[in-house]
Image (cartoon, helix red, strand yellow):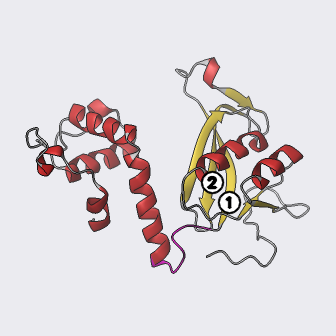
């Protein structure tokens, strides 16, 4: 919790900048947000032993507006990597996607049909490190091809200072000169990991080459 506390915004009243002391502890607010994300409940359905739902929502909205949520996650990710004996910033990553069905309330303008996965909804395009820790994610309609979304996904991640990414493993969907050019702009190499003939369903594929990701 020490890492989280160090990353928490300091209330103005503690810095003698005016305002009155806050009613709720930031730890309680953060626990409420974690509960909501883990259980998928509505804001108004937060249990009564958490702070009032409107206060939790207002804090979360403010933290998100100032990009605090991303900053907190990245600090925790770096800590996990360092404890595993790795560099805080990864040099190798993995890109993949996941199509999911959208609920009936999702409008046609923000959903699409993924013929390969038979999904009518949206697609998550995900960049992780080699430990599976999330680096970046973007969401599109499900009909957007993986190779079309990957450049913007990489761009969003590499736009932050201090990035050291040099190699990304992908499957055979991520090919084409436009994609290769976009990655080359950032000095990131793509390595396609292919299935062996006859493999079906979920299979863990071994990456080739002699790359040692730290």
* Mark 1 nearby-residue class (10 Å; few <14, some 14–19, many ≥20): many
Name the residue nearer the viewer: 84 or 121.
84
Q: Quadrant of residue 46?
A: top left
Pick the residue in front: 120 or 70: 70
Q: Is residue 98 left or right of residue 27?
A: right
Residue 147 shown left or right of residue 8 in the figure: right
The answer to whether residue 173 is seen in the rendering is no
Determine the residue positioned at 60% across, 37% down: 139
Mark 2 Cα-neighbour bin, 10 Å: few <14, some 14–19, many ≥20: many
Residue 214 place in picture, x, y as percent: 61, 76
Q: Residue at the spot x=78%, y=34% of the render?
A: 115
| Contact? badges 1 and 2 (CB < 8 Å) | yes
Which of the numbered marks, if any, corresponds to residue 127?
A: 2
Residue at 81% in and 75% down: 209
Q: CA distance from mark 1 to mark 2?
A: 6 Å
Check disc 1 and report its element: helix, strand or loop. strand
Outermost residue on the right side: it is 197
Relative to residue 41, is residue 108 drawn left or right?
Answer: right
Picture coordinates of residue 83 (x, y %)? 45, 77
Q: Farthest front residue?
A: 17
Q: Residue 52 location, x and y as percent?
A: 18, 36
Q: Secondary structure under badge 2?
A: strand
> Main SS type for the magenta part?
loop
Q: Residue at x 41, y 62 (%)?
A: 75
Image coordinates of residue 43 in percent, x first then y, are 31, 33
The stretch drawn in magenta includes residue 86: yes
| Residue highlighted by disc 1 | 94
Q: Magenta segment, which residues?
A: 83-90
Q: Quadrant of residue 203?
A: bottom right
Of the image marks 1 and 2, the number of the one nearer the N terminus = 1
Q: Is residue 33 above or below residue 201?
A: above
């Amino acid at each position: 919790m020490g890492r989280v506390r160090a990353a928490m915004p300091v209330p103005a009243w503690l810095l003698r900048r005016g305002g009155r002391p806050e009613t709720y502890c930031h730890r309680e607010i953060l626990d409420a947000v974690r509960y909501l994300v883990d259980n998928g409940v509505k804001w108004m359905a937060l249990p009564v032993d958490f702070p009032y739902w409107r206060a939790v929502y207002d804090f979360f909205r403010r933290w998100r507006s100032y990009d605090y949520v991303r900053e907190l996650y990245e600090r925790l990710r770096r800590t996990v990597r360092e404890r595993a004996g790795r560099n805080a910033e990864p040099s190798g990553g993995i890109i993949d996607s996941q199509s999911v069905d959208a609920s009936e309330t999702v409008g046609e303008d923000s959903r699409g049909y993924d013929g390969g996965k038979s999904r009518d909804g949206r697609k998550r395009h995900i960049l992780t490190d080699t430990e599976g820790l999330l680096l970046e994610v973007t969401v599109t309609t499900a009909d957007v091809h993986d190779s079309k979304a990957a450049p913007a996904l990489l761009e969003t991640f590499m736009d932050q200072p201090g990035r050291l990414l040099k190699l990304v493993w992908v499957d055979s969907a991520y090919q084409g000169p436009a994609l290769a050019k976009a990655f080359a702009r950032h000095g990131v190499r793509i390595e396609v990991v292919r299935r062996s003939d006859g493999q079906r369903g979920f299979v863990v594929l071994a990456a080739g080459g002699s790359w040692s990701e730290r």
